[in-house]
Amino acid sequence: MLRKITISIYHPNLVYSSFNPLITRQLSVSSFPPNPSYLKSLCSNGRLREALVEMAAQGIAMMFEGYDTLLNECVNQRAIREGQRVHAHMIKTCYLPPVYLRTRLIVLYSKCDCLGDAQRVLDEMTLRNVVSWTAMISAYAQRGYSSEALNLFVKMLRSDFAGTEPNEFTFATVLTSCTGPSGCNLGRQIHSLIIKRNFESHIYVGSSLLDMYAKSGRIHEAHRIFKCMPERDIVSCTAIISGYAQLGLDEEALKLFRQLLREGMIANYVTYASVLTALSGLAALDLGRQVHNHVLRSQLPSYVVLQNSLIDMYSKCGGLCYSRRIFDSMNERTVISWNAMLVGYSKHGMGREVVELFKLMREENQVKPDSVTFLAVLSGCSHGGMENKGLEIFDEMAITRDGEEPEMEHYGCVVDLLGRAGRVEEALEFIKKMPFEPTAAIWGSLLGACRVHSNVEVGEFVGHRLLEIEPENAGNYVILSNLYASAGRWEDVGTIRELMKEKFVIKEPGRSWIELDQILHTFHASDRSHPRREEVSAKVRDLSVKFKEAGYVPDLSCVLYDVDEEQKEKILLGHSEKLALAFGLIATSEGVPIRVIKNLRICVDCHNFAKFFSKVCGREVSLRDKNRFHRFVGGICSCGDYW
DNA sequence: CTAGGGTTAG
């Protein structure tokens, strides 16, 4: 039953209202008459619900200020249901919101992930201003809908309405959607608009611009913009540092970080996360520790992102126990924290720990495993000698369709698992039955298995398949020729060498480095650049002689060039990881473990050399190659000779 | 009312 109440009017826009007594029962009489400042005071006391009841009580009578107050609060609290009620109220009472309020609605819907509703509000607007356009573009951009953001931007440029010229907000936003292969082209066009409108030196636009160039690989252009910016702040500095780091230009990133610190930059957690990425790439443990100390001294609150990158940095620098310490100390973990830790164990070949941690993750049930998690777990099982457990987990993954659907990479892991277990034929059958066209990486992993298990028959088939898809990859020729050599099929070794001559492409020269007192010493194959080169190569020759006495036989099939055996041996001794090992032996004191990092996968001969190194020299060796860590102790490697 | 940099995997 409805009851009519007349309330006193003191607000010019407020008229008589009828309301439902069921609602009013909750209201104290003293709260009347409702007015915008009363709504405001309710909102500021966190009493949004009561404010909404007030709104309902006002029936047909709400005007700008009241709606503005309520929408503001809904946006702040990300309260979508309440926001919808406010919106519905506008419609029901035939209130026609001005551009400003409609824009608030767009913002509300987009912050609550209701992009369709936000777009509908924009579509219904007959008048739009730059803010309404920008809010919608930003909604798409922030959620990764790049093409929608860009299309909307173009639509905005074509729009005839007044007040639709993009401003600095629009440019800063839309540039973040210029990603991917065509991103840079679009970005350049937008850049020219920016120059025309004189926004190039704006600090937000500038950092967005330089980030766009950096992310599309045009780091010099990015750096030019950075240098030209009339003022810098922590975001623009971080953007350029992370630009270098993301492209793998780790040393440049580190150099810039140090230089900017010297110039007075106050790093924040994003800056640290970015520079830690660079240090992960360099595997520079001492430098990483130093940055960690900076972090601790700066007394930042704990940020999950930063802790995640610390976990990653320590594990990639060979300090896995520190990773675990950080992981255990976290009071909040994201899926990335778990993944980083799992990947750490996986790269160190610690299969048992991978399985244990994965079990813990499922038991805790706070964070749902994603496709990266499964990748880490499967490859961890493979590298850690837990083949059956890995196959079991893959089957679970394929059966329990509720979670992650296996992707190509997961199938690749299974090929790896089967291959490692010596089930090479089964792996081949598995590839044939996959719902994907096998990639070069998948054939490559099977070829590696064939080499380790000396399965020439399957290896030959796989190898030739691989040479068809990837004729430019030198590694494939090496492994196939290794395989033929191990079976004594010298004629076929010769054929492979002939094939190679025409197509052989060196993608990336081999390079190894070692960190001593926060300084990285880098060696290239047959290096002539290091100041102590003579001493180092003499040491390698010396070691080779010693190791031969202990049973070392140089594996000449690892050499690609068509030269005589003596030359081949000389080339082998010039491999960068041998130089780095020898340098480590010279430059560190007895008994100290030696950590070497290599940018490519380690070759069979160097792997063997390192084994003898650990045994004969009595030094523990940790060697990180492109795929994983190898830990050599007493002549045995943690990878079990399978990598 | 609208804006820029970040962590795992490949």
Image (cartoon, rainbow, N blue to C red):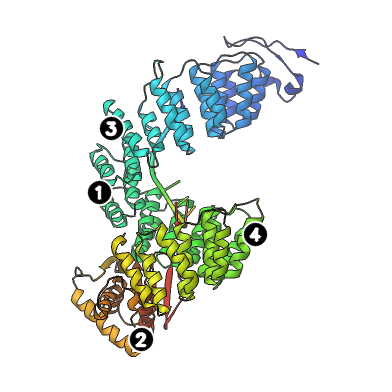
Quadrant location, the N terminus of chain A: top right
Q: What residue type is labelled 3?
A: Glu
Front position among marks 3 and 2: 2
Crowding at label 2, few (<14), some or many (≥20) Cα neighbours within 10 Å?
Answer: some
Q: Which amino acid does label 2 sit on?
A: Val
Residue at 59% x, 62% y: name it: A358
Q: In this view, does A75 lie above or below A387?
A: above
Residue at 32% x, 82% y: name it: A590
Q: How far apart are marks 1 and 3 (CA)?
A: 23 Å
The image position of residue A606, as x and y in percent, is 35, 75
Residue receiving disc 2: A616
Residue receiving disc 3: A200
Pointer 1 and pointer 3 on the same chain: yes
Image quadrant of residue A229?
A: top left
The answer for which chain carries disc 4 is A
Q: Which mark is residue A396?
A: 4
The answer for which chain carries disc 1 is A
The reply to whether residue A290 is visible in this rendering is no
Residue at 41% x, 50% y: name it: A269
Q: Mark 3 vs mark 2: which is more N-terminal?
A: 3
Front position among marks 4 and 3: 4
Q: How far apart are marks 3 and 2 (CA)?
A: 62 Å
Q: What residue type is labelled 4?
A: Glu
The answer for which chain carries disc 2 is A
Front position among marks 4 and 1: 4
Q: Mark 2 vs mark 4: which is more N-terminal?
A: 4
Q: Are marks 3 and 2 in contact (CB under 8 Å)?
A: no
Instruction: Report the side of A392 relative to A483 (left or right).
Output: right
Q: Distance between the residues labelled 1 and 2?
A: 48 Å
Q: Are marks 4 and 3 in contact (CB under 8 Å)?
A: no
Residue receiving disc 1: A263
Instruction: Report the side of A358 relative to B5 (left or right).
Output: right
